[in-house]
Image: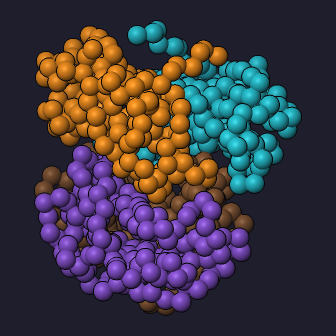
Chain colours: A orange, B purple, C brown, D cyan
Amino acid sequence: MSARPLPLSRAAFAHFQTITTRWMDNDVYGHVNNVQYYSFFDTVVNGYLIANGALDPERGAVIGLVVETHCNYFEPLRFPQIVEAGLRVAHLGTSSVRYEIGLFESDADAAAAQGHFVYVYVDRATRRPVLLPELLRTALAPLTA
Amino acid sequence: MSARPLPLSRAAFAHFQTITTRWMDNDVYGHVNNVQYYSFFDTVVNGYLIANGALDPERGAVIGLVVETHCNYFEPLRFPQIVEAGLRVAHLGTSSVRYEIGLFESDADAAAAQGHFVYVYVDRATRRPVLLPELLRTALAPLTA
Amino acid sequence: MSARPLPLSRAAFAHFQTITTRWMDNDVYGHVNNVQYYSFFDTVVNGYLIANGALDPERGAVIGLVVETHCNYFEPLRFPQIVEAGLRVAHLGTSSVRYEIGLFESDADAAAAQGHFVYVYVDRATRRPVLLPELLRTALAPLTA
Amino acid sequence: MSARPLPLSRAAFAHFQTITTRWMDNDVYGHVNNVQYYSFFDTVVNGYLIANGALDPERGAVIGLVVETHCNYFEPLRFPQIVEAGLRVAHLGTSSVRYEIGLFESDADAAAAQGHFVYVYVDRATRRPVLLPELLRTALAPLTA
């Protein structure tokens, strides 16, 4: 198995969003189920894009489809904690973007979990890849190292 | 069918909690799926109890089991909105509590949705109803009209 | 509080659908979280309509919006159980339908939980109520007592 | 970005479990949200272990904690499809297991999505890694290539 990455610190991320946990997130072991971490990832990515006018999920001509996701888990999260999700862009391709996300407990500088999402941006109707729209490139520029 | 209730206003509720919506909450019609409203209800109820020392879901001798839930939907919620959940206690029984919850958009005084949860408090091991613990009664007193 | 209803038996329902539970459904108390029951309700209702050509969630001119939901819980369900969801129609209104659902463990005749969903059928674009489409009335006829 | 893997065929997997999709799984784009795929992964892994007596999530002395998850998405899934989840074990470590999972539409031989879960098995009380229990090794043997 490949070596486990080390937790990133907050300084590695350019944008943060607060996410409140829910009672239902906790599984039988008393902490947030591993699946929900991806819901937090998806929320910070799409939340950023919507807030910056780069994604209109209901009417936009271009939508993002996920082709790869990944997460490493370091420390458990648990309801009723509040989570801060950090976001950065690691790679801007022709039609794809690799987003990297860290999840932080409110009093911690090291990520409790971190991972990535690769989105391919496609024409809503044909679902074929398109060049990244200028609006998207502009919105993502501040997230690129 | 019974008459539809009218939306309650914020003044009807004694305690509020902020809940952030998630990308995944939105269903194919572009707003928060009706099921997730109950997740918000459950979060404000248990969040209040944990914050006030009246519920320890992992070690407490008494836990709450849900026997009835209900929701009326007035206005759609949608990610990335932030929701404020209002809570009050409508009835304290021998071993049960009826919680009433309203969900509010941040700029609205009328509930977007409202409903109730009836919990029966039981011994964790035997799952038989118990008298409401004093700690719980004390915590709920400020929520009772 | 109003009197608790008695569990219905399988004979009360006209259509059944099998639903597999998921690891994540179980909450900290080791059984399916109360919220997920509504996901099962929504699945049997919309699954029936899609299978019978009465709902096209992506392109149909008429869609169903939920205005009221309710559930009574009698026995816990838990992953990895398989659940059978029974469906009947209790009321056909001008533009609304009241669906009643029972959830059954595979070896039980009495419902582990039961409840209802009231849907109002609306024009997809205007979201105003419409007369129930003939296709929907026809599909629902076998579910009406 | 690293090269995208090719979809595996059913023959690559040793065990299959049927998973029914739910109305709520579909997101605003009309197919199963990327997050839910992990719920399917977690379900086939833990479902297999429970069915084979190698995991007792409520009372067992050893539980599995997830340290890494990954998914590649090739074809969309959508409610009301039924999904078949294939499972194999790629690596048995001292205290960890790498499970690989493929998700298949019912009429397809190539995976619609595939990924992995790395679990570390720990003492329930101390949450420290333990040697893989003999019962677990025995249960996993048929899944190892």
In the image, A48 versus C45, the foreground residue is A48
Is residue C47 something that shows in the picture? Answer: no
Q: How many labels, in total?
A: 0
Give the answer, above or below, for where C60 lies relative to D41. below
In the image, B48 versus A29, the foreground residue is B48
Residue A17 lies in quadrant: top left
Coordinates of residue A106 in the picture (x, y in percent): 38, 42
Relative placement, left or right, of B84 versus B144 is: left
Coordinates of residue D95 in the picture (x, y in percent): 74, 28
The quadrant of the image that shows the N terminus of chain D is top left
Q: Which residue corresponds to the image point at 60% horizontal and 35% vertical from the top-left?
A: D66
Q: Which residue corresponds to the image point at 67% horizontal and 25% vertical from the top-left?
A: D98
Residue D86 lies in quadrant: top right
Q: Which residue corresponds to the image point at 58% horizontal and 86% vertical from the top-left?
A: B131
Is residue B142 something that shows in the picture? Answer: yes
Coordinates of residue A46 in the picture (x, y in percent): 27, 35
The quadrant of the image that shows the C terminus of chain D is top right
Give the answer, above or below, for where B129 lies relative to C36. below
Q: Which residue corresponds to the image point at 51% horizontal and 78% vertical from the top-left?
A: B135
Give the answer, above or below, for where A117 lies relative to A57. above
Coordinates of residue D8 in the picture (x, y in percent): 59, 19
